Structure formats: structure tokens, C-alpha cells
Amino acid sequence: MSMNGSGKVALNAGIEKAWEVLLNPQALKNCIMGCTKLETVGENKYEAVLSIGIAAVKGKYESTIEIADIQKPNHYKLIVKGEGGPGSVEATGVVDLISIDENTTELQYTYDAEVGGKVAMVGQRMLNGVAKLIIQDFFKKFNKELAKSEQSV
């Protein structure tokens, strides 16, 4: 089953800063819902374990996360492959950063995902809802990471 979506969000940081934090593995680990492990296994390639606790997608997913098509500081592609008890997911997200002013960056994203296994049986609407939740949660935490990194400068 396929799903896709898109959206945009305002980040409270200049574009260079937003880019830096977006590509920081520790920040990513803090922002990805249920991420208990994120290890670098190659250039821009990570192995992750995600424990997701929502409805029918509940479970532990062994995942690989790859960052591709990097055009600093404006654009990259995130390729996520995950497998767990509830099924499998293969997703590609495209992220574009647009500088609004020195303290604000607009992040636009689109994603496509293929879902298989038991997870696929919960239906499109439910899965779209879960995807939205995970994405909103990510950006909420991401703005916190940005604030943290501002303080440490």
C-alpha cells in the first residue's frame, strides 16, 4: 500500500543553522519518535531502532536511514527502510529549506511510503493519521533542538 503527503513548517533558525541541526545524528535521534538507537554505519547512512507505540503500527522497527541527493543548505532526500513485527515500511522524504530571514527558515517536505505486512491492513486513513503525528512530533522536537543549539553557541 502506498501513501504520500507533503507540508511545510517554519523553523526558528537561519538556514545554515537549520541545515546543521537537520544533519546532526544526535539531533535526529532526539527528534524521531521512539528512536532508541541511531548509529552511523557509513557516510550519511545510519542504522536505527524505532519503538513506535501508536495503534496498529505499534512495535519495534529495525531501520536504515540514508541521506542522499545533498545540496547544502537547501535540499536533501531521506530514505528510510524499516522492518518489524507489524510489517515493513519503505519511505522517501524530500526536504527543501528556504531562507525567509536570518532567524526563520521554511522547511517544505514531501514523502512517499510503501507499507507492507500487517500494518498495511489498518487502512490508508489511519496510516496517514499516524504519519502526520510522527511528522508533527518530529518538528515540535526539532524546534526544541534548534533552541538548544542556539544556547550552546
Image: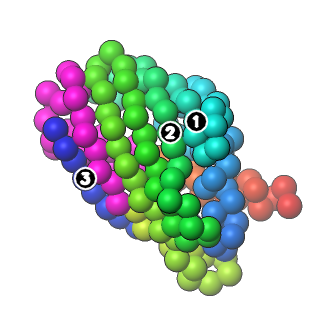
| Callout 2 amino acid | Ile
**What is the quadrant of the N terminus in the image?**
top left
Q: Is residue 52 located in the magenta-colored stretch of the structure?
A: no
Q: Secondary structure at mark 3?
A: strand
Q: Is residue 45 left or right of residue 6?
A: right
Label placed on residue 133 = none
Tell me which residue sits at (33%, 54%) in the image: 111
Residue 145 percent coordinates (x, y): 66, 52
| Callout 3 amino acid | Asn
Q: Earlier in the sequence, mark 1 or mark 2?
A: 1
Q: Is residue 127 located in the magenta-colored stretch of the structure?
A: yes
Tell me which residue sits at (43%, 45%) in the image: 79
Q: Mark 1–mark 2 contact, CB under 8 Å?
A: yes
Q: Secondary structure at mark 1?
A: strand
Q: Which residue is mark 3?
A: 4
Residue 97 percent coordinates (x, y): 52, 71
Q: Is residue 70 left or right of residue 123?
A: right
Q: Is residue 90 above or below residue 110?
A: above
Residue 61 percent coordinates (x, y): 42, 24
Picture mark count:
3
Magenta residues span: 110-136
| Callout 1 amino acid | Tyr
Q: Which residue is mark 2?
A: 65
Q: Earlier in the sequence, mark 2 or mark 3?
A: 3
Front one among 13 and 78: 78
Tell me which residue sits at (41%, 59%) in the image: 94
Front one among 28 and 114: 114
Q: Is residue 32 above or below residue 50?
A: below
Q: Earlier in the sequence, mark 3 or mark 1?
A: 3
Label placed on residue 46 = 1
Badge 1 crowding class, 10 Å Cα cut-off, few under 14, some 14 to 19, many 20 or more, is: some
Residue 66 percent coordinates (x, y): 51, 43
